[in-house]
Image (cartoon, rainbow, N blue to C red):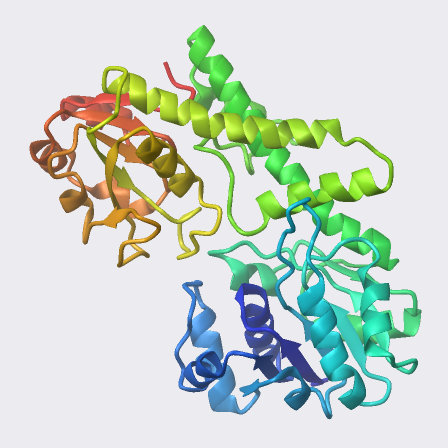
Amino acid sequence: MASKIAVIGTGYVGLTTGACLAHMGHDVVCADIDEAKVDALNSGEIPILEDGLENLVVEGRRAGRLRFVVGAANAVGDREFVYLCVPTPQGDDGSADLSYIEAAAREIGPVLAPEAIVINKSTVPVGSTRVVEHALQRGDVSVVSNPEFLREGSAVHDFLNPDRVVIGAVDQAAAIRMAGLYIGLTAPIMVTDPASAETIKYASNAFLATKISFVNAVAAVCEAVGADVNDVVLGMGYDRRIGQEFLKPGPGWGGSCFPKDTVALVHIAEQAGYDFRLLKGVVDVNNEQFERVVRKVVAAVGGDVAGRHIAAWGLTFKARTDDTRMSPAIEVIKRLQALGAEVTAYDPAIRMDIEGITVAPDAITACKGAELLMVLTEWDEFKWVDLDEVGQQMTNRRLVDTRNLLDRSRAQVSGFEYQGIGRS
C-alpha cells in the first residue's frame, strides 16, 4: 500500500532514500534548503555519481511519485512519514553536531500532520530520538530510528536489497506502521529500542573499519616475513566465520562515514564511562597506514620526494563514486606534497583540480614526466591501461600499487619496479 512520505535533505542518503521509496510505489516529496539544487533535481540533474540513482529519479518524476521542494515545512503538511536525512557533522571532540537535525525538527513540528511518524535516518548519537521529540514539541507524533546501511557506489542496490532493516521505536504501533513501508523487500526487519538501533549503526561501521585496519596490519606483517597478503586473506576468507568482505588491504579507510562514525563511537563510549581502547587502536592503525604508504613511495624514489614528479591514479575515497570526503588517496597525496613532491592525479570521476592537486584529463597524461606512479583508488579502468605506453611517458618506471589492483607480472614485463601492499 502506497504511503505519503517526506524526505528532509537530498544528500547521498536523502536522495537515495527518496528515489528508492518512490520506486517502491510510495508518494515522496524531498525537501532541501538549497534552491538551486532543488531546481536542478526538478530538471532531472543529479548532483552526485551513484549507480542507478539517476534512472530512479527520472522514473519517479515521470510517474508523479517523486518531487522536490525548497524548505522542510513545505514538504510535510500531509505526509504520514517524514525521514530526517540531514548532515550530522563531526565536532572537534568527536561528537556529532545535531544542530541541523534539531533545526529541521523545529521547522516541521508546527506543520506535521496529526499522528505522523518522524524517522531519524541520519547517523545520530544514542538518545537522539529524544532530542528530536523535544525539538518537535508534538505529543501526538512518534519518533523512530531507522539507520541507513548504504555504501556509496552501490547505495541504490543496498536500499532495495538490504541485509536487514532496523527500526528502533518505543511505540510498537509506530514500528509496525513503519515496517509496512518496506513490504516487498526480502530482508529481515528487526524492531528494537531506539538506543539499540542507533548503536547498531555505529557498531557496524566500527567493525568494518576494524576489519580493514586489521588486514592492513596483516599486510605489514606479510611484507616483513615474505608472505603474500592476497593469498593470506584468501585463505582467511574461506572460513565462514570470517568471510571475504572487507579483507582487502589498501592505503587506509576513509569516506564520509567510517572516520566520523568510529571517532563518534569512541566519544559516545567515553561519555558513558567506557574507554574504547580497541577502537582507538583501529583509528591509530589507519593513520599509520597513510604514513606507511608515504614511506613506501619515498623509499621507492631514493629517500627524498622533494621536487620529484609523482603520478597518482585515483582521488575518490573508493571507486564508483565522485566523493572525495576524507579520501585516503588525497590524504596520501597531501602528505607527499608536504614533503615537497609534485603530484599530478587522474580520477575518472574528477574533472577539475581539487584541494591544490593538479588533475589530468586521462591516466596516460597524468604520468607524463613522472618518476613514480601510485594507484590509490580501485577503479577497474586502471587495470586495462597500456602500461608500455604509461612507461614511455615516465622518466622512471616505478609503481606503488596501494590497492593491489594491477597485474604484477604484466607490470614487471613492462619494465616497472612493482610494489604492492603486503606483497614481497
The residue that appears at 88% across and 58% down in the rendered structure is 193
Q: State the residue in front, 144 or 292.
A: 292
Q: State the residue in front, 39 or 392.
A: 39
Q: Name which quarter of the figure residue 185 lies in.
A: bottom right
Where residue 271 sits in the image (x, y, percent)? 83, 42
In the drawing, does residue 300 fall left or right of residue 245? left
Q: Is residue 212 above or below residue 186?
A: above
In the drawing, does residue 332 fall left or right of residue 268? left
The image quadrant where one finds the C terminus is top left
Q: Name which quarter of the figure residue 41 lies in.
A: bottom left
Q: Name which quarter of the figure residue 167 lies in.
A: bottom right
The residue that appears at 47% across and 14% down in the rendered structure is 222
Where residue 258 sits in the image (x, y, percent)? 59, 45
Q: Is residue 424 visible?
A: yes
The image quadrant where one finds the N terminus is bottom right
The residue at the far left in this view is 392
Where residue 287 sits in the image (x, y, percent)? 52, 30
Where residue 20 sits in the image (x, y, percent)? 57, 73
Q: State the residue in front, 417 or 132.
A: 132
